[in-house]
Amino acid sequence: MNAQTLEAKPAQEKNALPETIIRYIDDAKSLPHSESYLIAVLQMIQKHFGYLPASCMDEVSERMQIPSAVVTGVATFYHFFTFVPKGKHTVSVCLGTACYVKGAGLLFERLQELLGVKPGEASKDGLFTLESARCVGACALAPVMLVDDQVYANVRPDELPKILSKYGFKPAAK
Amino acid sequence: MATDKEVTLTIDGVVTKAPADATIMEAADSVGIAIPRLCYHPHLSIAGACRVCLVEVEGMRNPVASCAYPVADGMKIHTSSTQLRRLRRDVVELILDNHPQDCQTCDRNQNCELQKLSYEMGIRERYFEGERKQLEKDLSSPAVIRDPEKCILCGRCVRVCDEVQGVCNLSQHRRGFHINVAPAHEGNMMNSVCVQCGQCANVCPTAAILEHNATDEVFKALEDPTKHVVVQTAPSIRAAIGEGFGYPPGTPATGKMVSALRLMGFDKIFDTNFGADLTIVEEAHEFLRRLEKNEKLPLITSCSPGWIKFMEHFYPELIPFASTCRSPMTMLSVLIKTYYAEKAQVDPKNIYVVGVMPCTAKKYEARRPEHFAPWGAPYTDAVLTTRELIWMMKSFGIDFNHLGDAYFDNPLGLSTGAADIFGTTGGVMEAALRTAYEKVTGQPLEQLDFTEVRGVEGVKESKVKIGDKTLFVAVSNGLTNAKHVLDKVRSGEKKYHMIEIMACPGGCIGGGGQPYPPPGMHIMDAKLLRMRAKALYSIDSQKQFRKSHENPYIQKLYDRFLGEPNGPKAHELLHTHYEPKFPKGVR
């Protein structure tokens, strides 16, 4: 095994940064502490693509002259940022204490089975991303689930297919 | 940030003065109180990450981290109390709780700062047991490997890579229990801007970062009757190997080292120094040709593989300026499998070349496709660090201290003093100047010591008069220092004729594969580096020949095998090329 076979080639997949973000970075360059605009730039990218593509983070690193390891270090620190494409809808299950006691853990497991995903991942058909939330402040309705901004209260695992079908979910044929 | 202002404070009842900008830890050190510490490193920025160095300050509600807390006038500090001892013990025990319990089988056994600290903190029983992080090892690089499960998040590797080497390949990813110190995208060391210098392994207090061990392969080759196993040792090994056997730093141990290598059963023991002499002859000719044509100046040295990879990632536009000379190690490996193979009538395919290097990046260099022989095998089959060789000798049961002196084999074992000093910053420059002077002027050089390029400072400059020309030269060690020099060259602020760059602080004597420092010293310690350098300069001063081109076997080698320096055969065998590497570095 020689070193060449192990080494990185320039990334093939390219998600170029949109013009607006490039202009924002260029404007920030002349400002004091220009590197502190990193998080704002990452937020803009996530808003644009729905996630942070690796190639975009590399481009940010080069344009802002911040080492790539620092960019990905910052991005992975914040729960807000995601590195895989998001589904069309986000399903969040509250795993706060009250919801958990009322069976949210079971809901979360059932959803992983139904959608065929692990937490944070998007389903194969691109419709759903499954996430956990820490207390949405509606403990009286426990267990609580959100699909995008819609709150579902007192959810039982057997109700899940019906709720999800409103958003285009089709149960896998047995 | 030295200031003239002083404050008076009391530490454990001792009234003392300290500079106003000192930390509590520094003030305590100066009165002989060594506060326990873990993440602190005197050559790196303050992290305050481990909370081991807690002390009590009268009037403050909570203990403070003494490495980060500044002194103040009238401050009363207590560094030892039942409460503090319990606190520190708990802090260390909580670190241990998230650390594998495999001390006996660990590479850093008896050499681990965490192990030592746990003992000193009096941890004899474990009260905490909880979930332990589970992270994959990164074995991708032939040079430097990571075991994140052993990482205690002190951040020294992150700081050395950023502050001393200017590479910034490592960063903490994620947060809390899931923190992982890794290259960008939590990728591996191979697909990154890592220059493989191993300084992270040097400063790591545990076994979270290590050299990629090659001792198994070497043991196997030594036992294989079909293999003709040839070893070569780099200049700086002789200045440091004694430390592994209890000698004080700076004890030259060439003779004992060769005796030990013989006992290990190597068929031939050659000296990388011979490769260094050859490098100087080739590089001096290359330099003089460029000087004559006034092109591709400054010439930048190419012996340090960490620097070469750094250039390919961070300064690809400077590639034309780098010397095309292969490193001394690879030059010698090439000669072993061509010139020596022919002379000794051994099939080069059966020759197994082991390089003993102060360096982890040499392990990487050996696997570069440019340094593979036409028959598909690497010219250097395995590279051992000084640390690995010390361990191998111990496992062979060799009583190093009682060995007599033995000598390298000829012809590739004879070297001049110019080659010995290759192992320290400024040495390659000095060696090159000795040869260049005589080649240009045709006069013998009277004063051989170019003292202006000696010393372990990060950047040195000198003007050297050779004939009717005045040459401006620069020497730097540590890649952040190299950046400073190169950026001035790029901006046109400075014009040099030649630049020597070594990736590691102090040069090869401070390489990523050198012995962990003895108690009371630390990595990058100027005192330690000076002692090791002194050993090399003393060997140089005692040599019969002190200029590379005077090496009689080098002269013979050109006459009978290579032809002219920089000639077609020399070019084919002794020179190489470089390419920009991805990902591109941010500098």
Image: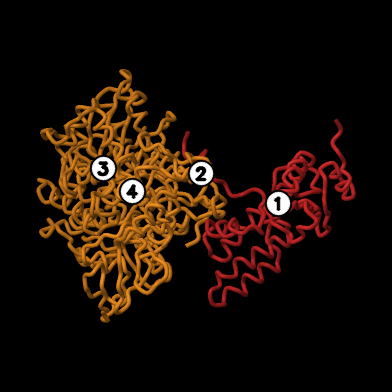
Give amino acid for label 1: Leu
The chain letter for the residue carrying disc 1 is A
> In front of the other: label 3 or label 1?
1
Chain shown orange: that is B
The chain letter for the residue carrying disc 2 is B
Q: Element at badge 4?
A: helix
The residue labelled by disc 2 is B130
Q: In this figure, what is the number of numbered marks?
A: 4
Mark 3 burial class by Cα count in 10 Å: few <14, some 14-19, many 20+: many
The chain letter for the residue carrying disc 4 is B
Q: Residue at x 52, y 44 (%)?
A: B133
User: Where's residue B366, x and y in %?
Assistant: 39, 39
The residue labelled by disc 4 is B113
The chain letter for the residue carrying disc 3 is B
Q: Residue at x 34, y 26 (%)?
A: B348
User: Where's residue A55, x and y in %?
Assistant: 63, 54
In the foreground, B238 or A155: A155
Q: Which mark is residue B234?
A: 3
Give amino acid for label 2: Gly
